[in-house]
Amino acid sequence: MKNFRLSKKLLMGAALACAVTVSFTSCEDDDKKDPVTPVRPTTGAPEKLIGLDISSNTTWSKDTIYVLTGRIKVRPPATLTIQPGTIVKGAEGQESNAKVLMVMRDAKIIAEGTASEPIIFTSVLDRIQPGEVISPNLPSNLQGQWGGLAILGNARISKGTLDPTSTFDEAQIEGVPATDLDGRYGGTDDADNSGILRYVSVRHGGTSIGSGNELNGISFGGVGNGTVVDHVEIVANADDGLEFYGGTVNATNIIVWNNGDDALDTDNAYNGTIDNFVLVGMEGSPFELDGPEGSYINGNHTITNGTVVTTRPDMTPAGDLINYDVNTNADLSNIFFTNVSSGQKVNSQGRASRDYLTLANITIDVAAADVINYVDQTETAINAFVSAGTTGFADMTEFGSWSWAGASGALSGL
């Protein structure tokens, strides 16, 4: 979330857009149905424009490509079900016009793809069709072409409160204007269920609505552990890959590839587990881990079993290997870093305290004598938990042909 970098890849979108004719129909009247019209000539699946909020149970199927033309909300108590193999595209739009799919508190999304039929969220510029995994026309490092996903729940967060009469912490999700009160998250139900994200790939997102208010590939705001997040890929997001704002949701088998800022970002006393992940070529930090911002603290979150490739050929990384603050409540273990660059460190930003942070089995693919150069020496106690190594900890068999990174060979040799 922090230190947002506007990638040069954004400039590529303008050139691509010139080659695409897009004709959107206004959907401001809630009494009108979303028209089924092709966004551009295609010999593939028809495209349906989605310009109205989803207020009743709705199913999207793979025989149609769905195009988000605004900030589309799944409103309670509705459930949006997205069938395996379905493609959802976000139209272009910057700042307050960024196209977002937002699942509000007490609503649900059931996006349950399969290893053979993943669900793909991408840009309207992408010519991908159902049955394809690799884009036929967009590069895998093209960032910021639409917004992203925001899932909001009722689990506890540590942020303070927007309402002085409230008995629990509550906040407004980043990437949604403060005037839109539907963007609030947080509550008291750590077992809250916002649905299922399984075998889902989210690509080319991350437009910004203003300085310090950017859209992640997926933002989880106060999402509870009744929610399933498993086999999820983020490709070329202009800001963070996944960000967890408090809550207790667990995430397994995660890929973040070619994103423009941090790969995994945690805030607001997040208390879930992220297990088995591969992070490749982020322009910020692999891990941006911030502690509570309110009075609620309840144990640590866990990040374990990961392989991290910190550089890619078209960029120079600017972020620390692990970035955390004095209040960061996290337990990190079995994490392997390779392709590290000089200057990258396990770094507390100069704060010589880690009261709530534990590290175990953190390895870096450098000579043993050089490991000390990648650890913040204001905290020499960390040296005991960081060592040289050459083997990743992620189970790479989980990231095969369902993901763009896996199908393209970008994960080969890890």
Image (cartoon, rainbow, N blue to C red):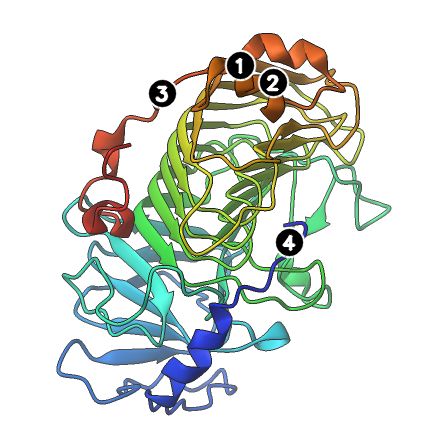
**Mark 1 and mark 2: span between their CA atoms?**
7 Å
Query: Measured from the top left, where is residue 298 in percent x and y?
Result: 67, 21
Does label 4 or label 1 sit earlier along the sequence? 4
Q: Which of marks 4 and 1 is in front?
A: 1
Q: In this view, does 317 lie above or below 252?
A: below
Foreground disc of the pair 3, 4: 3
- Residue drawn at x 28%, y 26% is 395
Q: If the image is split into quadrants, where does the C terminus sit?
A: top left
Q: Which residue is drawn at 64% across and 14% down?
A: 382
Indicate the position of residue 168 as horizontal and vertical percent values: 74, 37
Count neighbours of disc 2 (C-alpha within 10 A) and say few if under 14, some if 14 to 19, many if 20 or more.
Answer: some
Residue type, label 2: Ile
Name the N-terminal-most of marks 1 and 3: 1
Instruction: Name the amino acid, label 3.
Output: Thr
Distance from the alpha carbon under mark 2 to that under mark 4: 38 Å
Disc 2 target residue: 372
Kind of element beneath mark 4: loop
Q: Which of marks 2 and 4 is in front?
A: 2
Residue under pointer 3: 390
In contact (CB < 8 Å): disc 4 and disc 1:
no
In this picture, is 125 found above or below 390? below
In the figure, 69 relative to 60: above or below?
A: below
Q: What residue type is labelled 1?
A: Ala
Viewer-side residue, 319 vs 48: 319
- Residue 252's label in the rendered image is none
Which residue is drawn at the image coordinates 54% and 31% (left, top)? 248
Q: Can residue 51 be seen in this view?
A: no
Residue 149 place in picture, x, y as percent = 47, 57
Give yes or no for contact between labels 1 and 2 (Cβ–Cβ under 8 Å): yes
From the image, tell me which residue sits under label 4: 173
**Dot 1 corresponds to which residue?**
369
